[in-house]
């Protein structure tokens, strides 16, 4: 079987992208060498990687090539403008192609426009969707876990605040009871002191004893003659 056609678009996997860059960079430098030898051409190649590493090749001196390029650009402005126009047309075509690929991939992710895909491509798409769905589930579970943890923390804080308020209320109630007990004791002491002394300065208990003993004394002092008269 022949080698499958590779879609020219940005490689998302960083490792695969680096491996492809290394292989194709070496191949590009090899082709530049072959072109300079076979066609007796002055070739200069400058490549910057995605990590800003510089790779270059020149069949002669790179400085002399750059000077010749600047001179040619100044001497042929119309040719330079035409070249730039062609360059921007190619860039526009490349961007349009990338946009179409992205749009097609989006619709395929949404389960549409799948008729042009083979069984292997459909399997790859299914695997990619499963990986994406797994990532979504993991992110959702993480968010729910964090939310539950925050709610538990709030619950613990509220419980602690409730305990503190309960302790304060109990302490305040105890203080009120102690204060009420002291007031009652002071009132009872004042009442006892007031009842134990008469207004004229005599002892109230002695007055009560005297009053209770007066009827008995009167009965004892009754004349015998009156008692006898009453019996008759």
Image: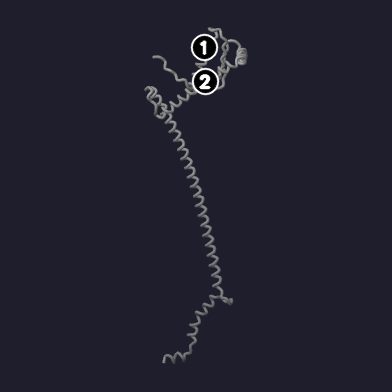
Q: Which residue is at the front of the view, 217 or 185?
A: 185
Query: SS class of the residue under badge 2?
Result: helix
Residue 180 seen in the current view: yes
Q: Is residue 180 above or below residue 20?
A: below
Residue 183 percent across, percent down from the top left = 54, 64
Front position among marks 2 and 1: 2
| Classed neighbour count for the residue bearing mark 2: other residues with Cα under 10 Å, few (<14), some (14–19), many (≥20) | few
Query: SS class of the residue under badge 1?
Result: helix
Quadrant of the snapshot with the C terminus: bottom left
Residue matched to label 2: 89
Q: Which residue is at the front of the view, 176 or 127?
A: 127
Residue 33 percent across, percent down from the top left = 54, 10
Q: Residue at x 46, y 35 (%)?
A: 142
Q: Residue at x 56, y 12 (%)?
A: 43
Q: Which residue is at the front of the view, 76 or 121?
A: 76
Q: Give the quarter of the image for residue 230.
A: bottom left
Residue matched to label 1: 31
Marks counted in the figure total 2
| Classed neighbour count for the residue bearing mark 1: other residues with Cα under 10 Å, few (<14), some (14–19), many (≥20) | few
In space, the residues marked 2 and 1 are separated at their CA atoms by 25 Å
């Amino acid at each position: 079987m022949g080698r499958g056609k590779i879609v020219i678009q940005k490689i998302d996997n960083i490792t695969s992208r680096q491996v492809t860059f290394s292989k194709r960079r070496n191949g590009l430098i090899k082709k530049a060498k072959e072109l300079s030898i076979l066609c007796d051409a002055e070739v200069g190649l400058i490549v910057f990687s995605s990590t800003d590493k510089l790779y270059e090749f020149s069949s002669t001196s790179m400085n002399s090539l750059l000077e010749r390029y600047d001179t040619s650009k100044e001497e042929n402005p119309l040719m330079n403008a035409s070249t730039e126009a062609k360059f921007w047309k190619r860039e526009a075509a490349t961007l349009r192609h990338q946009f179409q690929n992205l749009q097609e991939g989006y619709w395929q992710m949404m389960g549409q426009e799948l008729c042009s895909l083979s069984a292997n491509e459909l399997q790859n798409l299914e695997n990619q969707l499963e990986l994406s769905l797994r990532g979504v589930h993991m992110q959702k579970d993480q968010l729910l876990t964090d939310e539950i943890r925050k709610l538990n923390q709030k619950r613990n804080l509220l419980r602690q605040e409730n305990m503190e308020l309960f302790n304060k209320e109990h302490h305040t109630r105890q203080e009120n009871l102690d204060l009420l007990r002291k007031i009652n004791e002071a009132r009872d002491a004042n009442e006892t002191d007031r009842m134990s002394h008469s207004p004229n300065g005599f002892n109230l208990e002695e007055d009560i004893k005297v009053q209770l003993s007066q009827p008995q004394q009167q009965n004892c002092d009754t004349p015998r003659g009156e008692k006898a008269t009453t019996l008759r």
